[in-house]
Image (cartoon, rainbow, N blue to C red):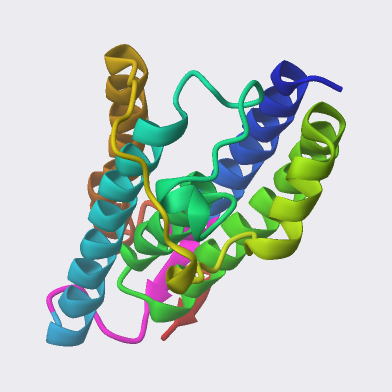
């Protein structure tokens, strides 16, 4: 197992999750109709979560882009959470689900993302234990996997960054915003009777 294989597994699992998420988007309606203040509020809350995801992933990549698997990064966001890139992606997934106007769909998308990244992280941790040994074992004991312990924060004076990697991470994160027009498109198709509504959720 190497980092390339782990990343391939992550991409396959994410693709499957996106297909399932797309199906849920397509056939789900909410108790609050489109245009209702609660429906719009949930959608806007989702956009806020997506923007937190975009900025958080970009911030995290400043510390690790180009070094993942080679150097044990334990500064900045990695001092309080072992997987901040994934943690912010979970937040973004919840935001994507909220674009349906449903709190329940938002929670389901967040939970599915958590399960996906839990599986991926389990593989990555095996690899990193082999590469970094005791240093990584100590890091595992000290720093949580997803939920940050902010009091552990420590930083460095300077960072060497790879602009192309940061721009790529930012661009990848912006894809979360595609949930906005996609959800609106599905709402239109449901209202037009093109797509059947199989579930109505809060």
Q: Nearer the viewer, residue 152 or 44?
A: 152
202 on left or right of 32:
right
Residue 33 among magenta residues: yes
Picture coordinates of residue 7, whole percent (x, y): 66, 26
- Quarter of the image for the N terminus: give it: top right
Q: Nearer the viewer, residue 24 or 130?
A: 130
Picture coordinates of residue 102, whole percent (x, y): 37, 76
Q: Is residue 147 above or below residue 38?
A: above
- Quarter of the image for the C terminus: give it: bottom left
Residue 65: image quadrant is top left
162 on left or right of 73:
left
Q: Is residue 137 visible?
A: yes
* Span colored in magenta: 24-35
Picture coordinates of residue 170, whole percent (x, y): 29, 31
Picture coordinates of residue 110, whole percent (x, y): 52, 64
Q: Nearer the viewer, residue 177 or 150?
A: 150
**Residue at the spot x=33%, y=36% of the render?**
175
Q: Is residue 125 above or below residue 87?
A: above
**Residue at the spot x=23%, y=71% of the render?**
45
39 on left or right of 14:
left
Which residue ends up furthest to the front in the rendered image?
Answer: 157
Q: How many marks?
A: 0
83 on left or right of 168:
right
**Residue at the spot x=29%, y=45% of the render?**
54
Q: Is residue 192 visible?
A: no
Residue 49 among magenta residues: no
**Residue at the spot x=67%, y=50% of the render?**
116
């Amino acid at each position: 197992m190497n980092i390339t294989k782990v990343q391939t597994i992550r991409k396959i699992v994410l693709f499957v999750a996106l297909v399932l998420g797309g199906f849920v988007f397509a056939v789900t309606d909410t108790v609050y109709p489109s245009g209702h203040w609660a429906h719009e509020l949930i959608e806007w809350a989702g956009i806020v979560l997506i923007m937190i995801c975009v900025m958080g992933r970009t911030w995290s990549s400043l510390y690790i882009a180009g070094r993942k698997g080679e150097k044990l990064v334990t500064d900045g966001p990695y001092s309080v959470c072992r997987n901040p890139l994934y943690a912010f992606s979970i937040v973004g997934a919840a935001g994507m689900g909220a674009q349906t106007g449903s709190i329940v769909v938002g929670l389901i998308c967040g939970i599915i993302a958590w399960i996906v990244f839990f599986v991926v992280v389990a593989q990555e941790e095996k690899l990193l234990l082999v590469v970094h040994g005791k240093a990584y074992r100590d890091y595992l004991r000290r720093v949580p996997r997803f939920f940050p312990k902010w009091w552990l924060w420590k930083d460095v004076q300077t960072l060497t960054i790879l602009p192309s990697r940061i721009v790529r991470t930012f661009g990848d994160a912006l894809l979360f915003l595609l949930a906005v027009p996609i959800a609106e498109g599905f709402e239109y198709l449901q209202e037009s009777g093109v797509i059947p509504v199989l579930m109505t959720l809060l």
